[in-house]
Amino acid sequence: MNTFSEKTMEDAIVKNPEKFINEEGLRLLARQYRVGSYIFDLLFEDRHGGKLIVEIQKGTLDRTHTYKILDYYHVYKEENPRDFIDVMVIANIIPPERKRRLNDLGVDYKEVSESIFITDQSEISRKISENDSVSVVIKNSKKVKMSAKRNSKGPCEDIIMIREELKKEINSNWNISRGDGSLIVKHKPTIDKIENKYGKGLKVQIWMERPNEKGYGRCKFEVAYSIPSLSKEENISLREKIARKLRSLMAKDLPKEFEEASDSSTVIALRINLSGDQTDGNDINIDLDKNEILKIIEFYRFIDEKLNEWNYSY
């Protein structure tokens, strides 16, 4: 008899959140947490004091679970306005259209097969050791893991690698995402100022999608998401207004490798070029990857400095 259930998934995540959520230092606050008229599966606190709401679905992620995580976020935020909150969906299968929608909504996600949850630890270790991987040397001679093959359907090792390096750099004003599909780093003080002035919903963040097969990608500093009480047109106008203010602050000192963005809600951007096509593992260029990641770190440092200025003057 197959006894696999959502409780099986929940128990495994509680026992080893670092494995399933890709984040060190998470502390479980509650299971089956009630907020308003809702109950969600797990509530964690990260090392910066931010909260993470996790919703679990056995099998294939459906439309209901895709959207109700936002209800949890908004009701929890209303009851805990001073908390910085991230949300994540974990399911056995997440169809491509759902992944695109979750990315659009700013919701982190993890696709973890049923077999991973029910296989014993020794089998998991064996599978991990069999994965094709190489070590890429980053600054301070530390090593991070990089896949020898980019897989558009599975975790993006480039994003995971970049996120791990940024974790060493970001200060407590920033909250970094845990999802595999894209990199999202949100600036909490600026978000709080915007919410106090305009209402909850807009996020100021560094965002990067997974690089393409040839390693090309773009890091963006942007104003994202929307305020539920405003119309689509009003949200677009407000995002443009805030982005223009931030862009005018940053443009005068903009380093030559950064670019002013042409699309309305993006403030500045950075093009990167990681290793080329890695289908056989022979095209990995350690120096190239190292230098490109250092560019992303400099991108973060520049934005952090300018946001500190902006928050004093805005």
Image: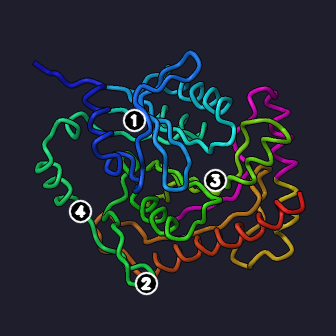
Q: Nearer the viewer, residue 189 or 58?
A: 189
Residue at 60 percent of width and 36 percent of height: 105
Q: Quadrant of the N terminus?
A: top left
**Of the residues under marks 1 and 3, which one precedes in the sequence?**
1
Q: Label 3 to label 4, Cα distance in Å?
A: 32 Å
Mark 3 touching mark 2, by CB under 8 A? no
Q: How many labels does the image show?
A: 4
Secondary-structure class at tag 1: strand
The residue type indicated by label 3 comes to: Lys
Residue lying at the far front in this picture: please name it: 29
- Residue under pointer 2: 140
Q: What element carries label 2?
A: helix
Task: List x then y, in percent, for residue 21.
Answer: 39, 47
Q: What element carries label 4?
A: loop
Can residue 59 be seen by looking at this rendering?
no
Question: Which amino acid type corresponds to the residue marked 1 in the rendered image?
Answer: Ile
Which region of the structure is painted magenta? 215-242
For disc 1, the marked residue is 90
Q: Which residue is drawn at 73% across and 42% down?
A: 202
Does residue 149 appear left or right of residue 297 in this picture?
left
Q: Quadrant of residue 279?
A: bottom left
- Label 2: few (<14), some (14–19) or many (≥20) C-alpha neighbours in 10 Å: few
Find the distance from the CA under tag 1 to the CA under tag 4.
24 Å
Question: As shown in the figure, which amino acid type bears the numbered disc 2?
Answer: Asn
Q: Residue 132 carries which label?
A: 4
Tell whether label 4 touches label 3 (CB within 8 Å).
Answer: no
Q: Does the magenta stretch include residue 240?
A: yes
Judge whether residue 112 is colored magenta.
no
Disc nearest the viewer among 1 and 4 = 1
First along the sequence among labels 3 and 2: 2
